Image (spheres, rainbow, N blue to C red):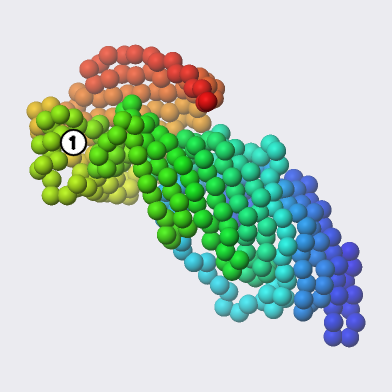
Amino acid sequence: GFVGFGGETTVFRLQAEAERARVRYPEGTSTTASASLSLSGTAERSIITGSVTVERAAFLPRTDVASLLLAGDKPLGAPAVPNPILSSMQLDVRVDSSPGLQFQTALARDLQTELDLRLRGTLAKPVVLGNVLVSQGEIQFFGNRYRINRGEVGFFNPVRIEPVLDLDLETRVRGITVTLNFSGSINKLSMTYRSDPPLQPEEIVALLAVGRAPMSGLAASQTIAGQNSGFQTGANTLLGQALAAPLTGRLQRFFGVSRLKIDPQLTGLDTTPQARLTIEQQISPDITLTYVTNLSEAKQQIVRLEWDLSKQWSVAAIRDENGVFAIDFLYKKRF
């Protein structure tokens, strides 16, 4: 391209081509993309046009998607003195994805995504319009792994970057299928959930938070009758998870533990209050080791080793609390 100087006006027209260029921004993110961009105009008014095709995206933070959503509504800090050239540099760049887009992260696996975004605004204050579609995959959410039935992240605000979520997640805990739906913007996110077979709301919360199996019959009616609030059980289990969060960070630093849960209100067969500790270690992207122990009964320990041989086949070796060893072969088929 060229840059021309004449009088008080600087005129430029520059073109750039990028092929499989890797950008490590923002922190913890690595993106490989090909682009064709053009910058034209003057120092007082200019525009960047072109297209960017994302071929690979890697996300590195050791956390889960829930933590990202809780921190996502924090406003971005604006520079104290805005740059006049960047403030007058308009954006009109289309961002899409290649057919074989690879999305690598410790938070998810087997993600199939499609980008259709438009970068507008100015370089000093960019705005994103369009949507991101997720057709399949699994994500880590509040310590549990969920399958994505349907997912869309839309950007509709022409003034600022404000993602609007519409996620339909499904997980299976203790033979019970739980479906969560998140919709709305980050700061006004609403959640609905249901289970198959149907459970009480407090039972679903306890099941997701610490994996507590739902009670039935007389024990369930006595427990619900003795509670002051229908969500007391869920609140206690979530409190236990919150208390375990700092410990989880320390275990990750020292031992590389992927997930830790503490259930502070587990009732045993003799109605004695007990506590259960669950530690999960992601040995590799395909192998997961889970250890469950009753803190009041050292002999009650469960060890589970699951190996994902492929997208369809996996094998799980289990030693239950009675010392019985078993191997299960699992086949997954999506209709």
Relative to 54, 106 lies left or right: left
Dividing the picture into quarters, in which one does residue 303 lie? top left
Relative to 132, 191 lies left or right: left
Q: Which residue is mark 1?
A: 266
Label 1 amino acid? Leu
Q: Position of residue 163 (x, y in %)?
A: 53, 57
Relative to 104, 327 lies left or right: left
Report whether residue 279 is seen: no
Foreground residue, 169 or 252? 169
Q: Position of residue 288 (x, y in %)?
A: 43, 28
**121 to 276, vertically: above or below:** below
Outermost residue, bottom side: 7
Foreground residue, 184 or 145? 184
Residue at position x 40%, y 42% in the image: 180
Residue at position x 39%, y 27% in the image: 289
The N terminus - image quarter: bottom right
Q: Using a 10 Å C-alpha cutoff, classify the residue at mark 1 as few (fewer than 14 neighbours), some (14 to 19) or many (20 or more).
A: some
Residue at position x 49%, y 22% in the image: 332
Q: Position of residue 63 (x, y in %)?
A: 44, 46
Q: Position of residue 268 (x, y in %)?
A: 14, 30
**292 to 127, vertically: above or below:** above
Which element type, helix, strand or loop, lies under badge 1? Answer: strand
**280 to 30, vertically: above or below:** above
Relative to 91, 259 lies left or right: left
Dividing the picture into quarters, in which one does residue 320 lie? top left
Residue at position x 13%, y 49% in the image: 228
